[in-house]
Structures are given as C-alpha cells and as structure tokens.
C-alpha cells in the first residue's frame, strides 16, 4: 500500500515536470551555488548546492534531531542532480531538479543507502534561494520517504 502511494506521488511529479514548457522560451540552466539551513523529517538541516557542470550539481545535506541518545545521531544525503532549465524570469525563478545518490546515518547504527531526490529551488532575491526536496530510499529499513525545506545564501 505504501509503495503504491509513493509511486503515484512520483508519477504526478513527473507528469507535472513534463507538462511545463521547458523549451518555450530562451531559458538557461541555473548557474549559482548556495549554502543554507532548514528543517526536515530528520530535524535541523544544513544543505547546499555545488554546480559541477552544465545542468549537473551535487546537493549535500546533513541533518540532526539533537537527540544523540538514539541510534540516528546524524543523517546525511549526497545526491548528484540534473538541474532542469529555469522556469520564470529574473530573481523569481523556479529551478527544479531530479537526481540520485547516497544517504544514511552516522551513529550507533551507521548505514549507507541509495536515494532518489526531487525538488526545486526558488530564487526570491538576488542572493537568497528557498529550497525544498523530497527523497526516497527504496532499499532502506525506515519508512523510505523524507523531506527538506530551507533557505540558502548564494555565492
């Protein structure tokens, strides 16, 4: 049951991305990097974006719930993402992304898993970006779905 709901969620997200007219205007790939903070299902998050090529980025993330007595002291996610062309103009532009990478926990029960990631950055000011992402760990022991919402400073 959980897998069918998740499949439906990814199908709707994929259909929405395909419906957006990416090639309708002369749009460019996002060319900024950022470091930010936020929150998610694992607690306080420090995340970022590092562009490594045209339309390709690494989006590292580390999270903690500050409950160091449990088995999940610190969680991490390091996906490589494909950055779709910008939707919108100027400073109010959405930059959707999709990717895959490694994730896991560092602590009493350390582990490494494979994760899929989808999300978007929203550039709301010249030097600031809001970001949101959903990650799915298909082979993990936990519930498999996580999220992050944050704000970053571009450089």
Image (cartoon, rainbow, N blue to C red):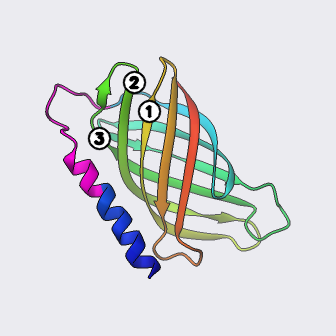
The rendered magenta stretch, by its main secondary structure, is classed as: loop
Is there CB contact under 8 Å for labels 3 and 2? no
**Which quadrant of the structure image shows residue 51?**
top left
Q: Residue furthest left?
A: 24
Instruction: Classify residue 9 as left or right of residue 63.
Output: left
**Which quadrant of the structure image shows residue 95?**
top left
Binning the other alpha carbons within 10 Å of mark 2 as few (below 14), some (14 to 19) or many (20 upward) gives some
**Which quadrant of the structure image shows residue 31?**
top left
Q: Residue at x 29, y 35 (%)?
A: 54
Task: Compare marks 3 and 1 and give the one earlier in the sequence.
Answer: 3
Please identify the quadrant where the N terminus is shown. Answer: bottom left
Query: To which residue does mark 3 refer?
Result: 84
Q: Residue at x 59, y 75 (%)?
A: 142
Task: Compare marks 3 and 2 and give the one earlier in the sequence.
Answer: 3
SS for dot 3: loop
Query: To which residue does mark 1 refer?
Result: 122
Query: To which residue does mark 2 refer?
Result: 92
């Amino acid at each position: 049951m959980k897998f069918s709901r998740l499949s439906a969620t990814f199908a709707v997200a994929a259909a929405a991305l395909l419906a957006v007219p990416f090639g309708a205007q002369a749009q460019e790939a996002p060319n900024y990097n950022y470091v930010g903070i936020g929150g998610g299902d694992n607690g306080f998050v420090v995340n970022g974006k590092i562009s490594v090529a045209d339309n390709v980025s690494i989006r590292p993330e580390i999270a903690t719930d500050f409950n160091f007595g449990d088995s999940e002291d610190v969680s991490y996610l390091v996906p490589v993402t494909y950055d779709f062309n910008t939707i919108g103009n100027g400073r109010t532009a959405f930059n959707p992304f999709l990717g895959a990478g490694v994730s896991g926990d560092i602590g009493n029960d350390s582990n490494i898993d494979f994760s899929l990631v989808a999300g978007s950055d929203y550039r709301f000011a010249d030097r600031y970006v809001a970001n949101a992402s959903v990650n799915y760990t298909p082979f993990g022991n936990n519930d498999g779905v996580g999220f992050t919402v944050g704000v970053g400073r571009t450089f």
